[in-house]
Image (tube, helix red, strand yellow):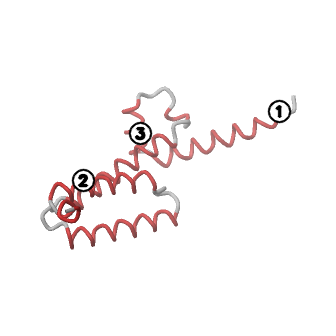
Amino acid sequence: MLIEFVTSEPGAYLLSFAFAVGVGLAVNWESLASWIGGLLITAAFVLIAFAYFAEAPLAVPLYVIVVGVASVLSNVRRYSASPLLAGEPYWRKVILTFTHQRAIRDADVAHREAQLAESPAEANK
């Protein structure tokens, strides 16, 4: 019964969506090892989808889009302390993170390093 649901069109789309959200949130695309892991997971999903989701031709495009969206939303949360995102509404943070992720990441790293450099000086006062 479970196999019948998963191989049906609604089940395939539900499984594709759930799998993509998990991969998008879990994989850090900036790390080489994580990027390779995400690529291998995606390749395995595509092969399984072609083999078992014959009734759901949009399962793979849905997977790719949802992985991208979940990854961007995860990065918005990860870089929320970046000075480039300060004071921006959430929808603008999403757009800025999607279009300028490297600059936002670099500003966030510099901001955190500056905070760490200031912390020991304040502790010695």
- N-term-proximal mark, 3 vs 2: 2
- N-term-proximal mark, 2 vs 1: 2
Q: Secondary structure at mark 3?
A: helix
Q: What type is the residue that disc 3 sits on? A: Leu
Q: Residue at x 56, y 36 (%)?
A: 81
User: Which residue is the site of mark 1?
Assistant: 123
Q: Residue at x 33, y 70 (%)?
A: 43
- Cβ atoms at labels 3 and 2 below 8 Å apart: no
User: Which residue is the site of mark 2?
Assistant: 14
Instruction: Identify the residue at the far right of this view.
Output: 124
**Percent x, y for residue 52?**
20, 70
Q: Secondary structure at mark 1?
A: helix
Mark 3: few, some, or many residues within 10 Å (few <14, many ≥20)? some
Vertical side of 88 occupied by 7: above or below: below
Q: CA distance from mark 3 to mark 2?
A: 29 Å
Residue closest to the eye, 43 or 81: 43
Q: Quadrant of residue 95?
A: top left
**Percent x, y for residue 44?**
33, 71
